[in-house]
Image: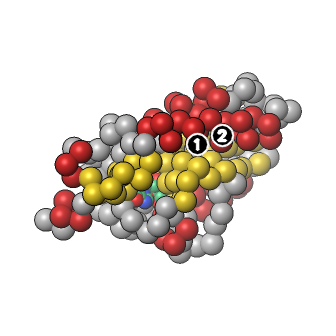
Amino acid sequence: MNKDIKEVLLSHEEILTITKKLGSLISADYKNSSKPILLGLLKGCVPFMSYLMNYLTFPLEIEFMDVSSYGNDIKSSGDVKIKKDIDVSVFNRDVIICEDIVDTGQTLNTVIRLLHHRGARSVEVVTLLDKPDGRITPFKPKYIGYVIPKVFVVGFGLDYQQYYRNLPYIGILKESIYKK
Ligand code: 5GP
């Protein structure tokens, strides 16, 4: 897999440092909250969320949704589908959505609207990566790990056609891989 990577953007150590910082910021903000839901968006959130939750020092529940806007392509389809819904009620709950990367913002806009519609008390977003140049709908996550340019990245949960999720770092995929 390493040979398919053009450039490493974040090493594993850098990801750990960023995740710890995010963990302490969120822990300070939620110390008086009543058992928030940390809601991971599958599948890309898995490595980041499993690291992040170690640095969250307040009682919480974890939940998952599987919402897809990319299919197997490198461009967001804009068509957001809910493939797996959250298993508990969010009514009157604080929800922290955990994302791997925010690009167009469409996935999060859809999920946030849905959670508010269901009566969540608050909804905030923590994302490991932010690609603000990709935005179609204006959106700013509250907790951002690292801002990247408009490039297609893989690793640490992020895939291309379901591959590369198990790379321990984040890297830019060589164009030759998806322009075959
Ligand atoms: P959005 O709705 O913000 O366009 O899409 C967010 C989702 O698109 C992310 O959760 C991720 O699955 C996918 N995505 C966006 N940018 C990238 C990228 O650079 N690489 C990969 N592998 N997935 C991305």
Where residue 3 sits: x, y (%)?
A: 19, 48
Residue in the picture at 62% in, 48% down:
126
Residue in the picture at 29% in, 62% down:
73
- In the drawing, what numbered circle is on residue 18? 1
Quadrant location of the C terminus in the rendered image: bottom left
Taking the image in four quarters, ligand 1 sits in the one at bottom left
Asked whether residue 29 appears in the rendered view, the answer is yes
> From what the image shows, is residue 52 above or below residue 84?
above
- Of residues 15 and 116, which is closer to you in this image? 15
Quadrant location of the N terminus in the rendered image: top left
Where residue 132 sits: x, y (%)?
A: 55, 68
Residue type beneath disc 2: Lys
Q: CA distance from mark 1 to mark 2?
A: 5 Å
Where residue 19 sits: x, y (%)?
A: 58, 39
Indicate left or right for 150 with 143 as reference.
left
Q: Secondary structure at mark 1?
A: helix
Indicate left or right for 4 with 56 as reference.
left
- In the drawing, what numbered circle is on residue 124? none
Asked whether residue 71 appears in the rendered view, the answer is no
How many discs appear? 2
Can you tell which quarter of the image residue 79 is in? bottom left
Report which residue position mark 2 lands on: 21
Residue type beneath disc 1: Ile
Where residue 95 sits: x, y (%)?
A: 70, 43
- Of residues 13 and 154, which is closer to you in this image? 13
Q: Residues within 10 Å of mark 1 (few under 14, many from 20)?
A: some
Do the residues bearing badges 1 and 2 touch, measured as CB atoms within 8 Å?
yes
Farthest residue toward the left?
180
- Of residues 117 and 12, which is closer to you in this image? 12
Residue in the picture at 63% in, 72% down:
138
